[in-house]
Structures are given as structure tokens and as C-alpha cells.
Image (cartoon, grey):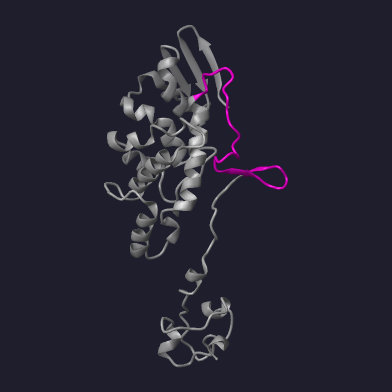
Amino acid sequence: MAAVQSLGNSAGAKTFNTDVLVLLLAHKHNLCDEVWMFSGTSRKKRFIPVHRIEIPEETRNSLLAFHAITGCDTTSQFCGIGKGSAWKALDSQTSNLLTSIGETSPPTQRTIADAEAFVCQLYHKGTREVEINRERAAAFRKVKKNIDSLPPTQDALHLHIRRANYQSMIWKRVQEACPSIPRPEDENGWYLNDEGILKPKLMTQEVVSSACIQLAFCGCSSEQSCLNRRCTCVRLSLPCSRACKCCDTNRCRNPENR
């Protein structure tokens, strides 16, 4: 946590936490005339004049939601999308999609839909697509190697948005002495496990549908093809199909084909 000290009309914070910098920027108009942040080391000191950092008002109003949805201490980051690339997607139009995040708990369907449209912009800037599953399908047709770079499913994304909304709501109320905060497990993307530990709910649907498994195919081509679990089809207890490479050799020995 940051160590904050008030000195007359100025305040200073000593921290290495990006969350604190974002909070100072979002609330600086309600703080002291001068706000400084120390984030350097004993050998290389760095003092950041937060009060001199100018950002458009519409961006500042969406800053907390932006930080929460793109990854912070309590929310995950989208694979392959860092703060730098995400910031490039934040403009006057896209920032308006985040203004209602953190206003209510749980978030409204409109809030979730707007946040989903913003995430579509993170993966494809300038797209008119507002549904992440469609953007995911388009990316799947283009991706060649790393499928982890695909956008999340809509099911997983909506839970992520709920967690970002919950964190944003807490940040927006940091200046209240005794804020009324709902429980995180009340439709906010979290749940309590059997040991009473709070965990993020990652999805509500099955991990892999049976239809997806049926689309598996192998690349076996040797004389001993499809004999052991090195074969994808054998490992999944599926018969080989015409999509498999062994189909070209007529040497398939997959027991599921018999």
C-alpha cells in the first residue's frame, strides 16, 4: 500500500503500485493543489508530478474502469494486450463505453454490452463489431499458432466485466468514509469455495463442448500410425476421419475405426 503524507496544499505518495497512480489521476481534482508520487529507487529517485498530468476529461472519467477492465491487482489481463496497446484504443468515442462501469452493482445489461464493445476495440481497433463471440470467430479464422491470443468467449468476458465493475465501484467510492459495498459474490464475478476462500468465477459454461471434440483430427502418417496415445484421435477415443493425415496413407490402425 502507498504511504501518503499531506503537507499543507500538497500531498505525496510513495509507492510502486500502478493502481495508486491511476487513483491519484482519477481523483486529483478533489485532492490537494499539488500531488506528487515517488516511484523510484534509493539510487535512482523519480518524483511524478501527478497534478501536471493532463488528460481529456472524458478519458479521466473512464480511467478507473479502463484500468480495471484491462488488468489490475484484482482483475486479469487479456493475453497479448498490454496497457500501451489498450491505451491506443481509448479515445473520446470508446471512453464513453466505460463511463457507467462501477456505477451499480451488479452492472446493468447496458453496461456489460458497452464494455463488451470496448473489448472488441482492443482486439480490432475501428471494428463495428460489438459482440465478442463474432470477433473471436473472425480472429480464429486468421490465427495460425497461438490460440491463446484469441479474444475471450462472451461467457468468460461478461464475468470479467462484472469483476472490473465491482473494483471500479470501490475505487469510485474511496473518498467516502463508510461506503456501502455489496458482497463480491453477489453477481459480481466471484464465488466462495468450500473453504470459504474468494475465487474468480471464470465461466458458467462447459470447458469444451462435445461438438468441438468431434472436430479433432490427427497428423499421423507412418506405418505405426494411430496405434498409441500420440495420435490425437486415439487419445480422445475418436475414430479417424477424412480430415486426418492417415487417411492419405491407408495405414490407419485406430481401433475406433473398426
Dominant SS of magenta comes to loop
Considering only vertical position in the picture, is 112 above or below 235?
A: above
Q: Going 57% across and 48% down the picture, which residue do you hit? A: 201
Considering only vertical position in the picture, is 3 above or below 122?
A: above
Query: Residue 234: x percent and y percent?
Result: 56, 80
Location of residue 70 (image quadrant):
top left
Q: Nearer the viewer, residue 9 or 111?
A: 111
Whether residue 10 is visible to the viewer of this picture, yes or no, is yes
Q: Is residue 43 toward the left or the right of residue 120 in the image?
A: right
Location of residue 136 (image quadrant):
bottom left
Magenta stretch, residue numbers: 173-198
Query: Residue 211: x percent and y percent?
Result: 48, 70
Residue 179 falls inside the magenta stretch = yes
Q: Kindly give the residue lying farthest to the front in the view shown.
A: 109
Q: Going 40% across and 89% down the picture, which residue do you hit? A: 248
Location of residue 35 (image quadrant):
top left
Query: Residue 207: x percent and y percent?
Result: 54, 61
Q: Kindly give the residue lying farthest to the right in the view shown.
A: 195
Q: Kindly give the residue lying farthest to the top in the view shown.
A: 8
Whether residue 55 is visible to the viewer of this picture, yes or no, is no
Q: Going 51% across and 21% down the picture, which residue do you hit? A: 13
Q: Is residue 166 toward the left or the right of residue 142 in the image?
A: right
- The tally of labels here is 0
Residue 60 falls inside the magenta stretch = no
Considering only vertical position in the picture, is 120 above or below 44?
A: below
Considering only vertical position in the picture, is 234 above or below 134?
A: below
Query: Residue 162: x percent and y percent?
Result: 50, 41
Quadrant of image for the C terminus: bottom right
Q: Nearer the viewer, residue 220 or 138?
A: 138
Q: Is residue 26 toward the left or the right of residue 230 in the image?
A: left
Quadrant of image for the N terminus: top right
Q: Going 32% across and 25% down the picture, which residue do you hit? A: 57
